[in-house]
Image (tube, rainbow, N blue to C red):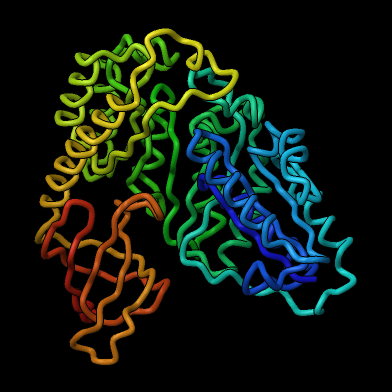
């Protein structure tokens, strides 16, 4: 039995697909292309309209090219919300599973394994991997459909997380990126106090072979002093944090049902930078939310300029079915959303360039992701990331010389670009003994 797995959406989907694929490899062999696979699987996303459209287009593309004998399965967020609609509109779909149905999908592969090739599982050999620590969310943001899809917060037991971390490390991961809908809420449903801090300590102790532990998706109001202390003290924990703020205007944040006191947000950023002076901070903003005035937007631009995040992402508001925001008055016209998005990204680009320039002349450690194909040493260049850059969403460091994927190399920054950095290798220091 052979399979083809297409993953769409966020890092949490990638983590889910990693778990599913590990089970699938025990039943068969991954196909080189969808054309040759016995089982076609699409792990879908449904967070915003663009994600839904991408998922639907991917399903239709596979359905149209589906051959006799192939089976098409749809899993994940889109199928959780629209199971009946998918089966009615796309008759080529054979199986529909919702979220967290990976065991059922794997069992389906076992049932189709009569044509299995008998090949052995293959290691992933990735330098970075996503490690999901929880799913679901107890927040009730007015624009977000995630609680409807995923339900309330449910944290994975620490033992299970450690075991998955060991499996990922054995497959070649030097960096584990911890993901959840709200990572800072980890363990609350398990009755744990300071659950995330304790989990970081456990992972650092039990996974010494992992070079970096990176935190994503922290809720603004849940960054305790204890968590900051642990982040600062543990060598393996990247001095990096992703805190989706969504906006800076109190009136917009109130309608979003988000923490709405900008002075508290500024104090939080001061605490982070005091605990870890070189911490890299990422955030995400949502523009064009219902009722967002031009003054609200100008406040947001000023906030971006003043707070100087290392990385800023942005989305245009997209009304989601069954969310309060979809029914709010004063919906912002699409042309206004697009204009505000462009202006925000220009401001974010300037802030990122300023932060990058501050690193010129400094040294840092790079996790090598790929090496150039140049045959001459003089033209060789490897690509990697520092602790300041999360995989897939942030920038790269391009450095002269040769290195192998997974190596940790010391480099000196020589030039700053808006999102990336150029570097030269630093010669290893001679042994002092």
Q: Which residue is drawn at 20% across and 85% down?
A: 379
Q: Is residue 217 above or below residue 233?
A: above
Q: Can residue 15 be seen in this view?
A: yes
In the rendered image, residue 254, in percent from the top left (x then y), is placed at 39, 10
User: Foreground: 95 or 192?
Assistant: 95
For the N terminus, which image quadrant? bottom right
User: Foreground: 355 or 49?
Assistant: 49
Q: In this view, does 277 lie above or below 399?
A: above
In the rendered image, residue 159, in percent from the top left (x then y), is placed at 67, 47
Q: Residue at x 73, y 45 (%)?
A: 90
Q: Residue at x 60, y 18 (%)?
A: 322
User: Foreground: 174 or 233?
Assistant: 174
Toward which corner of the image does residue 97 lie, by quadrant? top right
Left or right, residue 171 beside residue 66: left
Q: Can residue 191 be seen in this view?
A: no
For the C terminus, which image quadrant? bottom left
Q: Is residue 98 above or below residue 386?
A: above
Toward which corner of the image does residue 273 lie, by quadrant? top left
Number of numbered discs overlaid on the protein picture: 0
Q: Is residue 160 above or below residue 111?
A: above
- In the displayed image of the protein, which residue is found farthest to the bottom? 376
Left or right, residue 388 beside residue 207: left
In the rendered image, residue 307, in percent from the top left (x then y), is placed at 19, 30
Left or right, residue 232 beside residue 328: left
Q: Residue at x 79, y 56 (%)?
A: 106
In the rendered image, residue 293, in percent from the top left (x then y), is placed at 26, 13
């Amino acid at each position: 039995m052979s399979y083809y797995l297409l993953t769409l959406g966020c890092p949490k989907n990638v983590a889910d697909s990693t778990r599913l694929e590990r089970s699938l490899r025990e039943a068969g062999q991954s196909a080189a292309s969808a054309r040759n696979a016995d089982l076609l699987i699409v792990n879908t996303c449904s967070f915003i309209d663009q994600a839904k459209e991408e998922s639907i287009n991917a399903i239709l593309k596979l359905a149209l090219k589906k051959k006799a004998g192939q089976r098409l399965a749809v899993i994940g967020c889109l199928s959780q919300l629209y199971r009946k609609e998918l089966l009615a509109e796309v008759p080529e779909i054979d199986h529909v599973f919702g979220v967290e149905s990976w065991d059922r999908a794997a069992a389906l592969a076992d049932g189709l394994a009569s044509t299995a090739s008998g090949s052995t599982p293959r290691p992933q050999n990735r330098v970075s991997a996503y490690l999901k620590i929880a799913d679901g969310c107890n927040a009730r943001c007015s624009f977000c459909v995630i609680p409807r899809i995923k339900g309330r917060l449910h944290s994975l037991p620490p033992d299970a997380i450690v075991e998955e971390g060991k499996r990922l490390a054995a497959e070649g991961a030097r960096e584990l990126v911890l993901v959840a809908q709200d990572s800072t809420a980890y363990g609350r449903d398990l009755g744990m106090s300071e659950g995330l801090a304790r989990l970081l300590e456990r992972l650092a102790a039990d996974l010494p072979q992992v070079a970096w532990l990176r935190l994503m998706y922290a809720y603004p109001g849940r960054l305790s002093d204890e968590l900051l202390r642990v982040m600062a003290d543990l060598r393996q924990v990247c001095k990096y944090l992703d805190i989706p703020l969504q906006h800076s205007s109190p009136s917009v944040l109130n309608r979003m049902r988000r923490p709405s006191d900008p002075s508290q947000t500024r104090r939080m950023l001061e605490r982070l930078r005091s605990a870890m002076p070189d911490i890299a901070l990422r955030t995400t903003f949502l523009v064009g939310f219902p009722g967002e005035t031009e003054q609200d937007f100008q406040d947001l631009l000023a906030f971006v300029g003043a707070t100087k995040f290392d990385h800023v992402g942005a989305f245009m508001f997209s009304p989601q079915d069954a969310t309060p925001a979809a029914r709010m008055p004063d919906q912002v016209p699409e042309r206004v959303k697009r204009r505000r998005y462009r202006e925000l990204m220009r401001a974010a680009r300037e802030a990122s360039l300023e932060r990058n320039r501050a690193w010129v002349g400094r040294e840092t450690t790079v996790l090598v992701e790929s090496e150039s194909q140049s045959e001459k040493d003089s033209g060789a260049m490897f690509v990697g990331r520092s602790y300041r850059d999360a995989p897939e969403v942030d920038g790269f460091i391009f450095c002269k010389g040769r290195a192998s994927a997974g190596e940790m190399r010391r480099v000196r920054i020589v030039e700053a670009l808006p999102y990336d950095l150029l570097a030269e290798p630093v010669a290893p220091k001679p042994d002092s003994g």
